[in-house]
Image: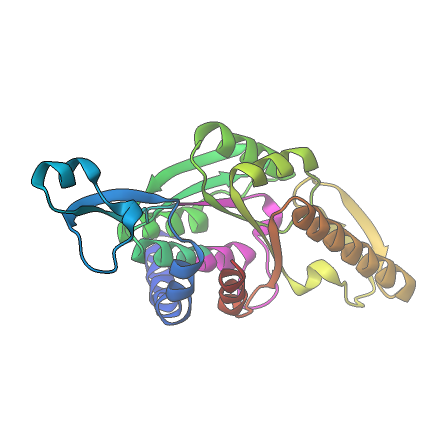
Amino acid sequence: MDIKDIIKKVKQIEIRTKKKSEATLMGQYHSAFKGQGMTFSEVRPYQFGDEIRRIDWNKTARFREPFVKVMEEERELTMMLLVDISASMDYGTKTQLKREFVAEICASLGFSAAGNNDKVGLILFADKVYKVIPPQKGRKHILAIISNILTSEYVPAESKIDEALQFMMSVFQKKSMAFIFSDFEDSYDLKILRVASKKHQLLGMRVFDDKDNEIPDIGYALFHDAETGKQVWANTSNSRWRYNYAEHQKKKIKEVTEDFENSSASFMNINTGEDYSKFLYQYFRKR
């Protein structure tokens, strides 16, 4: 894509996702991710019904009338978007590539966070961390994140979620909401996932294409692994071969889902082109 196409694409995503985030996600986002605690705001005269434990005894003694401390919720949170840019994410057989679909979901999350004055950061990874955009606030920052997801060079290498999680834990000490976008085709270190879920609030989002789960009958075909470069011929007309492939994928997805749930993290599967807002809405409600 040239620069004009990129700008047009980002603008289209902004228009679509801002409507979604404002209409369905923002309210649930705000109620789901409440502040990390309470902070002192001001002191005012006591009013009937105020809690006794809020009385500021020093000021009360000084002015000989009761005063109370007013506390407010610490609203500012940090959202981290961890996006897999291995070559298998630059693929799609329907209306969208996986990377385009991920950019749209990130935009919805980003605009929901921006509407609550929260910071949003981005980590692009494959076999290692390739780019980091530190957490900031505002619309322009969200647009820059969308642009980076769309325009980054997708890497012919196996994705290592461990690398991204370790980097996030070492650089961002404050507890964050971390959304991991990948097709989860590659293995990962379960211990690191468990440690990361204790430090941060994790949601794994498997973005997949129909052909990731099932291979159609197209006769003999040469399959090319975009990440490892390996090639293999297969007879897709063989119903047993297609069945074994589909069962292998189901087993893998089940194992990843259980790994996340057993690590006190969340996980969801979203097909490209699917209405992702309903999945996020349900996730926010559960929080």
Q: Position of residue 128 (x, y in %)?
A: 56, 32
Indicate the colouring scheme. rainbow
Q: Nearer the viewer, residue 252 or 11?
A: 252
160 on left or right of 243: left
Residue drawn at x 41%, y 70% is 24
Q: Is residue 285 left or right of residue 245?
A: left
**Apparent side of residue 61 relative to residue 287 in the rendered image (left or right):** left
Image quadrant assignment for residue 244: bottom right
Q: Could you tell me if residue 157 is visible in this image?
A: no
Number of numbered callouts drawn: 0
Which residue is rendered at x = 66% and y = 45% of the image?
226
Q: Residue at x 36, y 54 (%)?
A: 113
Closer to the camera in the image, 213 or 115: 115
Residue 278 visible, this orientation? yes
Q: Is residue 23 magenta?
A: no
Q: Which residues are magenta?
A: 78-105
Tell me where residue 181 appears, x and y as whole percent. 55, 50
